Structures are given as C-alpha cells and as structure tokens.
Image (cartoon, rainbow, N blue to C red):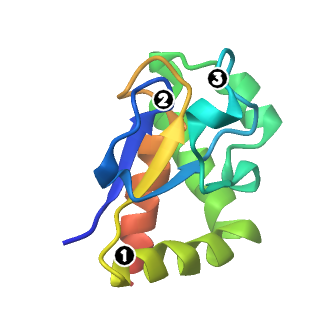
Amino acid sequence: MAEIRIKRIYEAMSADDGFRVLVDRLWPRGISKERAALDDWWKDIAPSPELRTWFGHKAEHFEEFAVKYRVELSTGRAAPTHMVTVAEHLAAGENVTLLYGAKDPAVNHARVLQEWMYAMMDK
C-alpha cells in the first residue's frame, strides 16, 4: 500500500520515494536541482515566514508550532489542491515523499504536514 513519507532532502533518493515534493519555503543549502530530483516544490504549503521564524526549530516550541501550522494548513488555499495530488498518487499505488531540509527528523514541519494529510484523508 502506498504511503506518505517524510525524508530529509540531504538523504539519497531511492526508487520507492515515488512522487518527490519539497515542502520547504526556502531552497535547501548545498542541494542542486539535479540532486534534489524533485517532481514538484510546494513552497505555498510550508509554514508562513512569520511562523517559521518564531518556531526556529526549537524543540520547546514544537507543540505550539504544530497547532499553529495545522491552523495555517486548514485555512490556506494551497492545501486542498495539493491534497488532490497526494490522493491521486496514492490511489495509483505510488508513495508520496515530503522532502524537508531541517536537521531534526522529529522536530520539523514535514512531520506535522504528514500527520495533517493523513487526518484529512480520514475525513
């Protein structure tokens, strides 16, 4: 069964990544477009610049950040369009890999986005 995965963009691409989409607002340092091997770049689904700056990838802010980011996702215009794309790839049996540049695999917006996407699919 196909799934939504998250992965650091600095990790090697793999055949089972499926549809690869960067979900950061800013391009990751040191990564060429060729190395990224993206199918798309959804900067419009990333946290707002204000929220990203406030969060600062500080673990002590993560829970509050996650709440605020979910609100942004639920009220933003880009998320429904991207959810259709995700659903189409999953229905075709293809994984969707959300790529991010943050160092911490547990404290980053891609994890919140992945959970939010699964929650939206369950509705």
Rendered residue at 26%/69% (across/down): 2
Q: Amino acid at mark 2?
A: Phe
Rendered residue at 58%/31% (across/down): 35
Count residues near mark 1 (Cα–Cα under 10 Å), then give few for <14, some for 14-19, many for 20+.
Answer: some
N-terminal of the two: label 3 or label 2? 3
From the image, which quarter does the N terminus lie in? Answer: bottom left
**Residue at numbered disc 3:** 31
N-terminal of the two: label 2 or label 1? 2
Q: Is residue 119 left or right of residue 75?
A: left
Q: Which mark is residue 62?
A: 2
Rendered residue at 56%/55% (across/down): 70
Q: Mark 3 to mark 2: distance in Å?
A: 26 Å
From the image, which quarter does the C terminus lie in? Answer: bottom left
Would you place residue 51 above or below residue 112 in this image?
Answer: above
Q: Mark 2 to mark 1: distance in Å?
A: 28 Å
The residue lying toward the viewer, choosing from 7 and 73, is 7
Q: Is residue 21 left or right of residue 16?
A: right
The residue lying toward the viewer, choosing from 28 and 62, is 28
Q: Residue furthest left?
A: 1
Tag 3 secondary structure: loop
Tag 2 secondary structure: helix
Q: Is residue 80 left or right of residue 119?
A: right
Query: Which image quadrant is residue 104 in?
Result: top left
The residue lying toward the viewer, choosing from 70 and 96, is 96
